[in-house]
Image (cartoon, grey):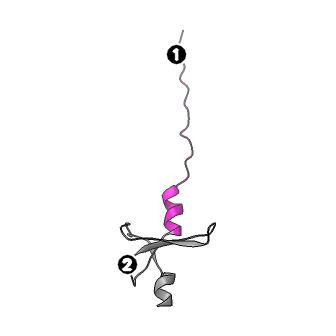
Amino acid sequence: MGESSITIPNPVIPDIRKHEKEKLKKCPECGFVWEFNYQKKTIHRYADFPSYGLKKEICKKCSMA
């Protein structure tokens, strides 16, 4: 008897990093990385977060000052 091989395709995993990168922004004024949470209507700010390649936009805290 001959052996038969079955090829199973890799599962399709969405690119989560790309989705998160679109939500995160870097504030050029204070240097924080921030995002707006639409469900809770709050802004989350991160001091120690890599910001390479993120869109630059002034956060609400700096725009009010």
Residue at the location (57% across, 45% down)? 12
Where is mark 2, residue-wise? 31
Residue 19 location (% of width, % of height): 54, 62
Where is mark 1, residue-wise? 3
In the image, residue 63 sits, relative to residue 51, either above or below, namely below
Q: Nearer the viewer, residue 10 or 54?
A: 54
Residue at the location (49% across, 88% down)? 63
Q: Nearer the viewer, residue 19 or 33?
A: 33
Kindly report the secondary structure that dominates the magenta region of the rendered protein: loop
Magenta highlight range: 2-23
Q: Does residue 15 belong to the magenta stretch?
A: yes
Q: Nearer the viewer, residue 40 or 22?
A: 40
- Label 2 sits on what residue type? Gly
Residue 17 location (% of width, % of height): 48, 59
Residue 35 location (% of width, % of height): 51, 71
Residue furthest top as drawn: 1
